[in-house]
Image (cartoon, helix red, strand yellow):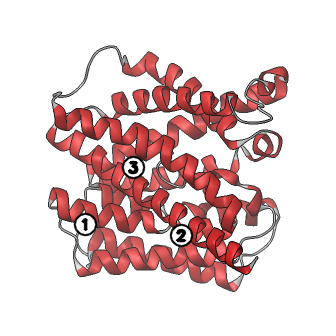
Amino acid sequence: MPRLTASRSVSGFILALSAAIFWGISGTCAQFLFEQKEMDPAWLVSWRMLLAGVILILFAIFRKDSDAFQIWKSHKDIIQLLIFSIFGMVTVQYTYFYSINLSNAATATVIQYIGPVFVVGFYALKNRRWPSLMEYSALFLALAGTFLLVTHGSFQVLVISEKALFWGILSAIALAVYTIQPVQLLRKYSAPTVTGWAMVIGGIMFSLYTKPWMVSGTWDMGTVGAFSYIIIFGTVISFSIFLYSLTLIGAQTASLLCSVEPLSAALVAVAWLGVTFTAMDWLGTVFILVTVAILTLAKKPEEKQANPTDINQASLT
């Protein structure tokens, strides 16, 4: 039995880490498409949600004890799903990809990871309590890490544009909304059902603005490869193996391991796209990852219900 338990733990660790690495590389693929293939971020978001959403719904349909269509039998749940689709799914995806377009995958991913700080703030206000000492420490580290990322320690200059910083912070806030809003749905329905339908609905509604039938960017084998990676490995496979890792090692451990995502985004962006990441950038990244670790370990019971963070902090973002 101990050997079996150890084997399950190792498998869970590998799966969770693989999912985080897949998500990080997905952000770098998006940067490649924006910079070198002139693809519109909104167009990519539309197709990612539509294609990945359909695959996830099919996955939900063929699951044992499928609840793929149960969600449509309650008017209250339909309204919640529509709200999540627009203000959660579409918002978190677009702000993240657009912030990549304005800066780079590494910086955008790390900044989005301050999202849990906004989650803590929400629950502090909701429950009318002051944050704990650990939460205050996490807030300080998040602010310090963001400061180092966007200024390299100087009070006089930004190393990314004000617009990139604005959209990066907006993506972190969107991540917090994405984390909190669908809690009630996730207590009743499986994650593939909620996420799949939210992506399809969001993709259809966003398509009214993006017109996905009008092809964006320069298409060649590199474009096809990066685009396919984002849909298959960066969304469907990463989502599936991360869900399975939750059953092996638990949500808290799996969520901590997913902090590897910004590191993988940074390493791949530096090695593949030649992104400059200075010592200050790495230090800022470490500060923000420590923030995530502190908030995950100190998470309150009501926050542990927020399953979307466990499913994907950035790249179902």
Q: CA distance from mark 3 to mark 1?
A: 14 Å
Under mark 2, the amino acid is: Leu
Q: Can you give x and y, in whole percent of width and height, for residue 249 in the image?
A: 67, 68
> Residue at horizontal 56%, vertical 25%?
200
- What secondary structure is found at the residue carrying circle 1? loop
Under mark 3, the amino acid is: Trp
Which one is in front in this view, the residue at disc 3 or the one at disc 1?
Answer: 3
Mark closest to the chain's N terminus, 3 or 2 = 3
Which one is in front in this view, the residue at disc 3 or the one at disc 2?
Answer: 2
Q: Are marks 3 and 2 in contact (CB under 8 Å)?
A: no
> Residue at horizontal 22%, vertical 45%?
32
Q: Which residue is mark 3?
A: 167
> Residue at horizontal 83%, vertical 28%?
76
- Neighbourhood count class around disc 1 (C-alpha, 10 Å): few under 14, some 14–19, many 20 upward: some
Instruction: Kindly tell me whether residue 114 is visible in this rendering.
Output: no
Q: Which residue is mark 2?
A: 257
Mark closest to the chain's N terminus, 2 or 1 = 1
Q: Which residue is mark 1?
A: 158
- Neighbourhood count class around disc 2 (C-alpha, 10 Å): few under 14, some 14–19, many 20 upward: many
Residue 81 vertical placement versus 14 (above, below): above
Q: CA distance from mark 3 to mark 2?
A: 26 Å
